[in-house]
Amino acid sequence: MSHVSLSIVVITDTVALNAWLTRINDFLNSARNQVSFKQEPDYLKSISEENDCQLFIVLIIDGDRVVFYSPAFLRVRPFPITFSTFKINGRSARIIEMENTPIVASEFDEELGMKKFMQVLWQHQDTFDLIRIENLEKSTTLAKYLSKQSSTNNHKLSHFDNTQKEEYVWRITFGESFAQWVDSLGRSTRQLIRKRLRKADAKLSDKLSFTHYSTAEEMGTYQNAVDVIYSNTWQAKTFGCFKRNTEEQIRFSQALAKQKLLDGYVIHYEDKPVAFFTGGFSRAKFEAVEIGYDSNYSSMGIGQLLSFMVIRNLHERGDIETLSFGFGSNNYKSMICDNHSAASEVFIAHGKWALLIRCQQILNRIENGLRSMLTHLNLDSFVRKRLKNK
C-alpha cells in the first residue's frame, strides 16, 4: 500500500487533543481490543489536567485518517535506584510514560510506523531524559523493532529491558455468561470458585458485603476504603505505606469516573473494608489497575474471592470481552487466565541517563543472583514472609 501523503502530528496539550479527538476515537473503535485503559484519550486528558503532566501523543496521518497512535505523557519526577524492596530517589528526570505499544492500523506498514516514531523521539530528545514503557509485550512490533535497532543504534537512543525475570501480561477471555466461563476452567479451579462464591453468597446478608463504586460521587468513599485496607496489605508492608485518599487522588478518581473509565470494588467483613479491586475500562476491555487485601484476612482467601466476584459482576454487565490482570506473576492468574503474553518494563534513554539505567541493570542482576541462591537453599519463602511482615 502506498503512503505518499503521510504526515506527523505531535500533540502536547488538551486543546490540540480535542481538535483530533473525533478522528482518534474513530480509529480506536476499529482497534477496540488493542486499546488499554491508559491509552484512552480521556485518561490522558484527565491525567494532564489533574497531575500537572504534559501530553506527548504521536499521530501518523495518511490523507486525513489516523493510522498510527502513540499515546503518552511527560512528567518530572525523581528517578529511583532500587534493590529488592529498597529504593533511593535520585535526581529528577523528565520522563515520557507510555503503556505497551503504539496502535497501528491493520493496513499500515507497522515497521515504517515504528521507524517514523523513533525519528520523532530523536527529534524531541531535548524535551525528555527517559522514556518508560510499561508492560511492553515482546510480541509487538515496537519490541521487535527496538531489539533489532539495539545493534545498529541508528537513532542514538538506547533501550533497556528493566525486568528482572520473565514476566507476563495475563488475560481472561469472557464467555457468554459467568457460568459458561467457570465451566471452561479446570476441574479443581471450577470447584474452588464455586465453593468460595457459595460460602460468600451465604454470608452476604450477614457478615460479608460486596460493594461496587462507579460514579464520581462515590469515589471519595471508595478511596477512603482503599486507604483503610492498604496499610495492612503485603504491598504496604513490603514497599511502604502512603495515603490513598488525598484530595488529589480523590479528584483524579472522580475525573476518570466521570468519563466512565474507572470502577472500584470492595469487600467489607463485619462492616470493615478488607479487600479492594480498582479497574479501568477501555472499549471492550477491563483492566485490573490495583488489587489489595488486608493480610489479617488472608486465611479466608479474601483476595481471590474478590477477584471471582468482580469477574462475575463484569460478566453480568454484558459489554466486556476481555479482563486483563496486567503485569506480574501470581498463582491464581495462571489458574483462571486463558491467555498470557511475555512482557517487560522498557526504558529508552540517551547520555548520562542511559548510564544510570545500566547501573540499575547491574543491581538487578545481583538481586537475581541472590534470589537464585536463596531458592537453591530453600530460603526464598522464609525471606519473602519476613519482608512481607516486617
Image (spheres, rainbow, N blue to C red):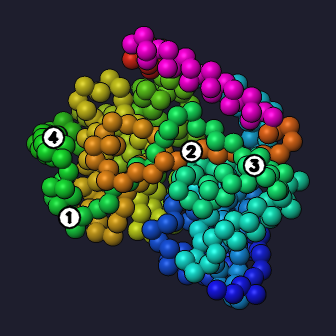
User: Is residue 126 visible to us here?
Assistant: yes
Image coordinates of residue 284 in percent, x first then y, are: 40, 68
User: Is residue 306 visible to us here?
Assistant: no
Decide which of tag 1 and tag 2 comes sooner along the chain.
Answer: 1
- Indicate the amino acid at tag 3: Ser
Q: Which residue is mark 2?
A: 344
Image coordinates of residue 384 in percent, x first then y, are: 44, 19
Circle 1 crowding by C-alpha within 10 Å: few under 14, some 14–19, many from 20: some
Return the mark for residue 188. Answer: 4
Give the camera-side residue of 273 and 199: 199
Q: Which residue is mark 1?
A: 177
* Residue drawn at (60%, 72%) of the image: 104
* Residue drawn at (45%, 68%) of the image: 33
In space, the residues marked 3 and 2 are separated at their CA atoms by 19 Å
Q: Which residue is mark 3?
A: 151
The answer to which quarter of the image holds residue 286 is bottom left
In space, the residues marked 3 and 1 are separated at their CA atoms by 48 Å
Query: Magenta stretch: residue 172 in it?
Result: no
Decide which of tag 3 and tag 4 comes sooner along the chain.
Answer: 3
Decide which of tag 3 and tag 1 comes sooner along the chain.
Answer: 3
Tell us which disc is closer to us: 3 or 1. Answer: 3
Q: Which portion, as a residue range, is magenta? A: 355-378
Magenta stretch, main secondary structure, is helix
In space, the residues marked 1 and 2 are separated at their CA atoms by 32 Å
Instruction: Judge from the rendering whether residue 100 lies leftward or rightward of residue 362; answer left or right.
Output: left
Does 360 appear above or below 258?
Answer: above
